[in-house]
Image: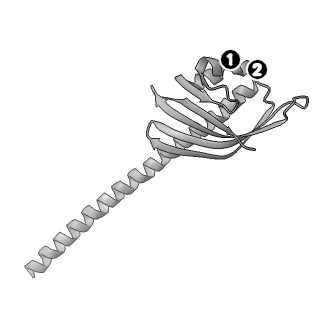
């Protein structure tokens, strides 16, 4: 009887430890999912803010979203642009509307994420080109507690 009682105690102890570990791991998993969702929501908001700033010719907001070592490659064949060149393009923007489609955020680690989406830009009625569709890839990095776009590349959809 004593052996059976001892075995039961061991089984109960092991079951309790396994249940405690599972509950802890499940709680961490839920907490991790909540953090990932918050980052995804923030980056989605940043992408919309990026295009709103471009549409509204708001250089400060656009500049604040970019890392100091930001690099962009656009589909115009003019090569890479640093932050200063990209920000100066805001003044020349003729984007009247934009439509984001298939936004996807892939966390790479806690301080980096790859954001991809399809973008259709609409230009004013008198513009030579009315619509432009591009596939966009952006690398966002968390620096000093702030998410900044480090890299931007677009490819025209024909």
Q: Residue 62: x, y in percent?
A: 64, 24
> Is disc 2 placed on a helix, strand or loop?
helix
Q: Which disc number belongs to residue 60?
A: none
The residue drawn where x is 30% and y is 59% is: 20
Quadrant of the image containing the C terminus: top right
Spatial distance from mark 1 to mark 2, Cα to Cα?
A: 8 Å
Q: Does residue 108 show up?
A: yes
Residue 40 x, y percent position in the rendering: 55, 42
Residue 60 makes an appearance in the image: no
Extreme residue in the bottom direction: 1
Image: 90 above or below 15: above
State the mark number for residue 92.
2
Up-down relation of residue 48 to residue 4 (above or below): above
Q: Residue 88 carries which label?
A: 1
4 left or right, relative to 134: left
Residue beneath the point at 75% across and 28% down: 55
How packed mark 2 is, by other alpha carbons closer than 10 Å (few <14, some 14-19, many 20 or more), is few
Is the residue marked by circle 1 packed among few (<14), some (14-19), or many (20+) residues within 10 Å?
few
The image quadrant where one finds the N terminus is bottom left
Asked which quadrant contains residue 52, the reply is: top right
Task: Answer with the quarter of the image where residue 103 lies.
Answer: top right
As drawn, the residue found furthest toward the left would be: 2
The percent position of residue 64, horizontal first and vertical second, equals 59, 22
Disc 1 secondary structure class: helix
Does the residue at mark 1 contact the one at mark 2 (Cβ under 8 Å)? yes
């Amino acid at each position: 009887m004593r052996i059976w009682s001892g075995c039961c105690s061991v089984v109960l102890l092991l079951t309790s430890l396994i249940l405690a570990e599972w509950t802890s791991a499940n709680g961490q998993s839920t907490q991790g999912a909540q953090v990932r969702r918050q980052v995804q929501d923030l980056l989605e908001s940043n992408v919309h803010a990026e295009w709103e700033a471009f549409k509204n010719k708001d250089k400060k907001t656009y500049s604040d979203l970019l890392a100091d070592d930001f690099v962009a490659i656009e589909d115009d064949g003019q090569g890479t642009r640093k932050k200063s060149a990209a920000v100066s393009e805001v003044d020349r923007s003729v984007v009247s509307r934009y439509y984001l489609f298939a936004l996807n955020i892939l966390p790479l680690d806690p301080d980096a994420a790859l954001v991809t989406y399809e973008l259709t830009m609409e230009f004013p009625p008198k513009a030579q080109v009315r619509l432009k569709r591009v596939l966009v890839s952006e690398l966002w990095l968390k620096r000093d507690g702030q998410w900044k776009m480090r890299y931007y590349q677009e490819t025209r959809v024909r």
